Image (spheres, grey):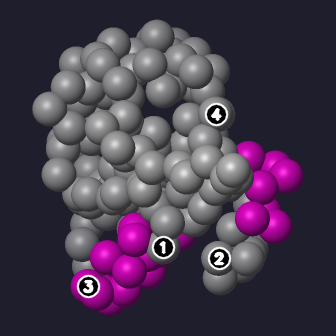
Amino acid sequence: MRQVEPAITYTSELPEDFTELFELYNALGWNSLNLNVRELQAMCEGSWYSVYAYEGNRFVGMGRVISDGVLTGLLCGVCVHPDVQARGIGTGIVQRLVMHCEKFGVIPQLLCEQGLEAYYERLGFTTFTIGMKKNIKR
């Protein structure tokens, strides 16, 4: 008998408790800067637009856009919990972020880790430049 997985729901409403985002970042190994729950909450609150994914009541993913709301929007923080990856949740998040950008005529852009280019190309993105960063001490 096939087990039915709970439906994934998406919302742009901020979570009531950012502890789950903290736990997700840790599960992904993304918290090298040792951000705390309050800092993650401020990060989300300061974003132009965010999408949060839930499997039932469980927080399983998110993504956000940083933008001036006029010209460009940088998609960032797109993540899905490791135990529910490869089920289309990340795609659902990215599609919603892009739709919001397009609604306002904002050009969606992103930086991704090497090796993820093909994933984003399947979602309509093309390579246009080389991204660079400067590491800082926190």
Among numbered discs 4 and 3, the one appearing first in the sequence: 4
| CB contact under 8 Å: marks 2 and 4 | no
| Labelled pair 4, 3 in contact (Cβ < 8 Å) | no
Q: Rounded to the nearest whole Å, what is the CA distance between mark 2 and mark 4?
A: 22 Å
Based on the displayed image, in which of its 4 quarters is residue 68 positioned? bottom left
What label sits on residue 123 in the rendered view? 2
- The magenta region covers 96-119
Q: Earlier in the sequence, mark 3 or mark 1?
A: 1
Mark 3 and mark 2 lie on one chain; the one further toward the N terminus is 3
Q: Which of marks 2 and 4 is nearer the N terminus?
A: 4
* Mark linked to residue 83: 4
Tell me the kind of residue under disc 2.
Leu
x 33%, y 13%: residue: 36
Residues packed near mark 1 inside 10 Å, few (<14), some (14 to 19) or many (20 plus): some
Q: Where is residue 9 in the image (x, y as percent from the top left)?
A: 34, 57
According to the image, label 1 marks what residue?
95
Q: Label 3 vs label 1: CA separation?
A: 15 Å
Q: Is mark 4 on a helix, strand or loop?
A: helix
Q: Distance between the residues labelled 4 and 3?
A: 34 Å
Is residue 38 left or right of 9 when viewed as pictured? left
Between discs 1 and 4, the one toward the N terminus: 4
Q: Judge by depth and name the residue closer to the eye, 67 or 24.
A: 24
Residue at image position (26%, 26%) is 18
The amino acid type, in three-letter code, at marker 3 is: Phe
Q: Residues within 10 Å of mark 3 (few under 14, many from 20)?
A: few
Residue assigned mark 3: 104
Q: Is mark 2 on a helix, strand or loop?
A: loop
